[in-house]
Amino acid sequence: MLGNREALWTLWEVSRAGTHAAAAARLGITASAVGQQLKALDRQVGVALFERVGRRARLTPAGGALVACLGEHLPVLDAALEEASETQRTVRGEVSLGGPWPFFRHWLRPRLPGLLSRHPELQLEVRFDVPSRIARRLLEGELDLGIVGLLPEAPGLEVRQVAQERFVAVASPAYLKRWGTPRSARDFGAHRFIAFDADLAMLGPWWRTTLGPKEPLPAQVVCRIANLDEMLALAEAGVGVTVLPDYLVDPAVREGRVVALTPEVGRRSPRRPWGTLWVAWRRAAAPTARFLAVRDWLLEGHGMEAQPRRRSG
């Protein structure tokens, strides 16, 4: 490109202002800096672009031809650059966010009004999906940000911890009446389970934490279904035992639709089975103002438990 943008813009301003001093005042630089930029541009072009007439600078024929070209293109280019720069400074436009529906409902929904009030020109598109598809959509650019319960094995993603959720095993009173209430690890191993997927998400971490890492995982997984609400509904219907986040099952426990199960651990102090939730984004994502606003808003909740807000009284 001929010269740099700064020198070309200086040439344009001097042609309009008529003097180095007037152009310098409009550009916010010194008259000396104006002269240095024009000399550098003269050297690159190989011909003088201005000639001095008293205190004024008059364009040479070569300078006039260049300024005429700049008059067609430089303002348009400058406007385009300003628009691109504005994208980096103003929280405006759409950001797509993916994650699990129950977590959004209990943890994010109460916080959304504050975000959208803070940034009235922000548009948020929320999609619900399982972690593996969220990771893929992030890498393919279909999502800007995602919340996942498992660390994605994708080097192209950046992740930060955003929240924790506590897991609880539950079953319906009717199921426990028929199959008995499990107490020991052996008891639990004989029961029927409803799981999220083949990797036993939630169930596996709960099992290893409460029953011990050496206890064999349950063999009777009678239903796998990648939907937390449906897992709870099946547990209420007496299909089996399931493990879910406490904020999801708390209402059902209070209403007696399911019973929270606590294994006997003898003298060993039971550890609380926690799951970690992560916010993820593509490493190569452009850091626009709207992206940063949503990402930083999500990270404001770092270390908070995924608990629903309860009314006092």
Image: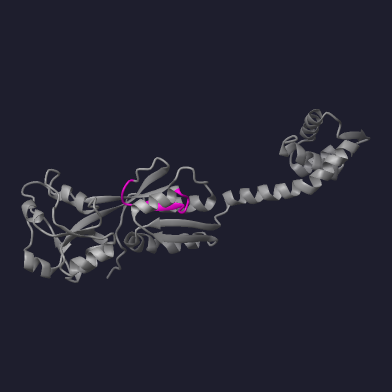
Q: In the image, is residue 125 part of the stretch drawn in magenta?
A: no
How many marks the image carries: the answer is: 0
Q: Which region shows up in magenta?
A: 140-151
Q: Quadrant of the N terminus?
A: top right
Q: Residue drawn 20% across and 54% down?
A: 203
Query: Residue at 19% across / 69% down in the picture?
Result: 236
Please indicate whether residue 62 sits to the left or right of residue 85 in the image.
right
Look at the image and say whether residue 149 sits in the magenta stretch.
yes
Query: Majority secondary structure of the magenta segment?
Result: loop
Any part of residue 22 in sight: no
Residue at point 10%, 55% (across, down): 188
Residue 17 in the image: x percent, y percent? Answer: 84, 44
- Residue 76 at what x, y percent from top left? 73, 50
Q: Is residue 253 above or below residue 61?
A: below
Where residue 47 sits: x, y (%)? 85, 30
In the image, residue 45 lies at what x, y percent? Answer: 81, 31
57 displayed left or right of 73 = right
Residue at image position (26%, 65%) is 230
Outermost residue toward the right in this view: 54
Please say if 5 is above or below 188: above
Q: In this picture, is 149 found above or below 2?
A: below
266 or 277, which lies in front?
Answer: 277
